[in-house]
Amino acid sequence: MAFRRPGRRALIATLTVIAALLPVSSIAAVSALGDAPAGGGNSGAGPAIVGFSPHRGPIGGGTVVHISGGGFIDVTGVSFGAHKARSYKVRSDNVIDAVAPRVPHGGKVRIHVAASGGAAGSNASFAFVGCHVPRLKHDRVGEARRALAAAGCAVGQISRVRGAHGPLRVIAVNPHPGTWLEPGASVRLRVR
């Protein structure tokens, strides 16, 4: 039975697990995973992403993400899903520091690194987090507070309609439900 060399994705998956246990300086071996020509071997031609940290940041961007892997010397771009990084700096053949961009709403995306010899995407996702204003109309104030906290928001000013008496219920929310804001942003409630 002939020995078959494992595929590039299998090697990257294995090294991702190993890299979680090692300091970044010990990951130099990953540079051998560049996009090799069909004949195999180490061409060092393309990048490979082993991991990154942190795994989340605000929708407003600005989070510095440390990407580890190999083949990073000739990097031509870094992106978070469809959005280009605000900036990036290649620290070494194995480390890039990229600044997450501003995005319109929360969600999870893969990080991509492009280089002259090819491109690589992360196995894990980067999560953009924010305050996603929920629908609260007719909710009692206590329910509205809990829903806002679960949505990553804070309770802002609560104003009562003149003559309102308990139990108080939400009749208006500002900003409007469905709006994305920075994490922990205040949402104003009008109650009756």
Image (cartoon, helix red, strand yellow):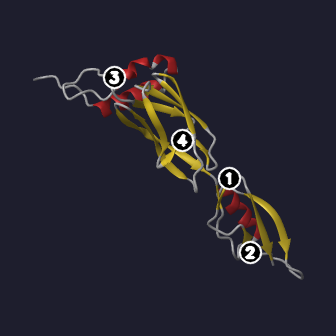
* Placement of 30 over or under 60, stated as above or below: above
In which image quadrant can residue 64 be found? top right
User: On the picture, is 153 further left or further right than 55?
Assistant: right
State the residue lying farthest toward the left: 1
Task: State how far apart marks 3 and 4 are (Cα).
Answer: 24 Å
User: On the picture, is 37 further left or further right than 94?
Assistant: left
In which image quadrant can residue 11 be found? top left
Task: State how far apart marks 4 and 2 are (Cα).
Answer: 37 Å
Q: Which is more N-terminal, label 3 or label 2?
A: 3
Q: Which mark is residue 44?
A: 3
**What residue appears at the point 25 percent right and 21 percent down from the top-left corner?**
41
Evaluate whether residue 99 shows in this view.
no
Q: Nearer the viewer, residue 121 or 148?
A: 121
Inspect the image, locate mark 2, and give the three-letter code of the amino acid beneath it.
Answer: Ala
Determine which residue is flagged by label 4: 85
Q: Which mark is residue 172?
A: 2
Determine which residue is flagged by label 1: 182
Q: Secondary structure at mark 1?
A: loop
Q: Position of residue 58 (x, y in %)?
A: 63, 47
Q: Nearer the viewer, residue 126 or 86?
A: 86
Mark 3 touches mark 4? (CB < 8 Å)? no
* Placement of 130 over or under 122, stated as above or below: below
Q: Position of residue 98 (x, y in %)?
A: 55, 35
Mark 1 or 2: the one toward you: 1
* Placement of 110 over or under 91, stated as above or below: below
Task: State how far apart marks 1 and 3 are (Cα).
Answer: 40 Å
Inspect the image, locate mark 3, and give the three-letter code of the amino acid beneath it.
Answer: Gly
Task: State how far apart marks 4 and 1 are (Cα).
Answer: 18 Å
For disc 4, the neighbor class at 10 Å (few under 14, some 14 to 19, many from 20) is many
Mark 4 touches mark 2? (CB < 8 Å)? no
Evaluate whether residue 102 shows in this view.
yes
